[in-house]
Image (cartoon, rainbow, N blue to C red):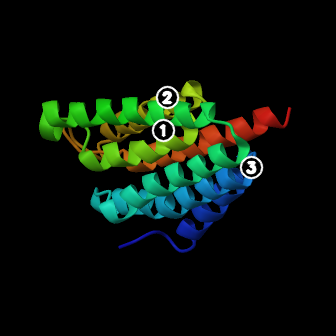
Amino acid sequence: MGAHPYLLELCAVLTVAVVVLTAPTIPVLLAGLWWAGCAVPLMFIDGQVHRLPDVLTLPAAAGVFALLTVDAVVADRWEPLRSATICAAVATTVFVSTGLVLGSRGMGLGDAKLILSVTGLLGWWGWGAAFGSVFLGFLSAGLVGVVLLATGRVGRGAYIPMGPFFIATTVVMLALMARASRG
């Protein structure tokens, strides 16, 4: 059981590199690095055991918001923090509501806790980044699900862990923003 040799380390290095290239300030860099330190293990845990443990999801969100708040205080730039907070609140409310209404057929509460840090971090750059990443996460999970069904690797009703998709698409969105900011 576990990740292929060096896959976790490779994902961590790539995620850190993307965060370093994207972050415009030291507190935002630290928020991204904190998130990466929690998110990369979460990706592998959810992929293996279909769980997103509170011991990583909650500190990920708390660290992201604490460090984004430091950025707002130091730079006297409150709008990105407001955007991050609203994005995270809306996305988390939708995920929790869906999980509560649909039960096991909906999003798990672990996914809702993960999405709090994902949309909080990306929400600093705006609504498009945060919800674009969530949309890409659903789209990529759906495409993988179709391929797995078509190839007979899973049957109808199989559970596909969403955490790895949300984390991967967050890193992709950060990479796209780094590229856009560089011209």
Q: Earlier in the sequence, mark 2 or mark 3?
A: 3
Q: Which mark is residue 25?
A: 3
**In which quadrant is the C terminus drawn?**
top right
Q: Are marks 2 and 1 in contact (CB under 8 Å)?
A: yes
Residue 11: image x %, image y %?
58, 61
The structure residue drawn at horizontal position 75% and vertical position 45%, both measured from the top left corner, is 24
For mark 2, what is the residue? 131
Q: Are marks 3 and 1 in contact (CB under 8 Å)?
A: no
Q: Along the horizontal axis of the image, is 100 left or right of 93?
A: left
Residue extending furthest toward the right: 183
The three-letter amino acid code for the residue at tag 1 is: Thr
Q: Secondary structure at mark 3?
A: loop
The three-letter amino acid code for the residue at tag 3 is: Thr
The three-letter amino acid code for the residue at tag 2 is: Phe
Residue 120: image x %, image y %?
50, 41
The structure residue drawn at horizontal position 49% and vertical position 48%, both measured from the top left corner, is 167
Task: Choose between 77 and 41: the one closer to the eye.
Answer: 77
Residue 68: image x %, image y %?
58, 47
Place residue 144 in its image quadrant.
top left
Above or below, 49 relative to 102: below
Q: Earlier in the sequence, mark 3 or mark 1?
A: 3
Above or below, 57 relative to 111: below
- Label 2 Cα crowd, 10 Å radius (few <14 / some 14-19 / many 20+): some
Above or below, 174 relative to 129: below
The answer for how far apart the CA atoms under marks 2 and 1 are is 7 Å
For mark 1, what is the residue? 119
